[in-house]
Amino acid sequence: MNDDLYAPFSPRFVRYVAWAAIAVVAVGGLVVAWVAPGTDGRGYAWVDVLGTALLLGAGCAFLWRQASVSARVDTRGVTVRNLLRVKTFDWSEVVAVTFGSGDPWVMLELADGTTWPVMAVQRADGGYAAREAARLASLVVLHGEGHERLR
């Protein structure tokens, strides 16, 4: 098995931005808690601290999820981990890979006539994304019922 061909797909730009944003949110939350010790020097009420911590934690969890989108491939199929859902497709279910000029990410065209987004290959990555889309399309042709159609 060619390891390069079966390497996981993951975006670059959005991953870097999300990890940087997590650092900013975490450090920013700590700085605000330290520099602004509440009203009139009395400190924050526990409910304010809890609410702020929950809000910052939810923001970091969302950013982490965005940073961890991926698509893993093997000889059986592709498992796509998008922002909210994870779905596995056998190669026989995937007919084509499209990456139109206006699409923010790659789309899998499925045998049942539907499409599925692959957020792991994103337009923001430029030439890298185009190469990764072509690699995914070649896997579809190699293993499935697919035909070479990368728009």
Image (spheres, rainbow, N blue to C red):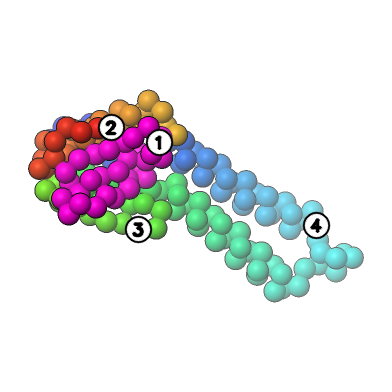
Q: What kind of residue is marked 4?
A: Ala
Structural crowding at the residue carrying mark 2, measured as other residues with C-alpha within 10 Å and reported as few (<14), some (14–19) or many (≥20):
few
Secondary structure beneath label 1:
loop
User: Depth-wise, is mark 3 or mark 4 nearer the camera?
Assistant: 3
Mark identifier at residue 151? 2
Q: Is residue 49 above or below residue 86?
A: below
Q: Mark 4 points at which residue?
A: 36
Q: Quick check: can you spot residue 6? A: no
- Crowding at mark 3 (Cα within 10 Å: few <14, some 14-19, many 20+): few
Q: How far apart are marks 3 and 2 (CA)?
A: 25 Å
Q: What element carries label 4?
A: loop
Is residue 99 within the magenta segment? yes
Instruction: Give yes or no for residue 105 being in the magenta stretch.
Output: yes
Separation of marks 1 and 2 at Cα, in angstroms? 10 Å
- Report how far apart the C-alphas of labels 1 and 4 lie in the structure: 45 Å
Q: Nearer the viewer, mark 1 or mark 4?
A: 1
Disc 2 is placed on an element classified as loop
Q: Which of marks 3 and 4 is nearer the N terminus?
A: 4
Q: Percent x, y for residue 4?
A: 23, 31
Please give the residue where the numbered disc 1 appears in the rendered image. Answer: 102
Q: Name the residue carrying label 3.
A: 85
Amino acid type at mark 2: Arg
- Dot 3 or dot 2: first in sequence order is 3
N-terminal-most mark, 1 or 2: 1
Q: In which quarter of the image is residue 6?
A: top left
Mark 2 or 4, nearer chain start? 4
In the rendered structure, which segment of residues is drawn in magenta? 94-123
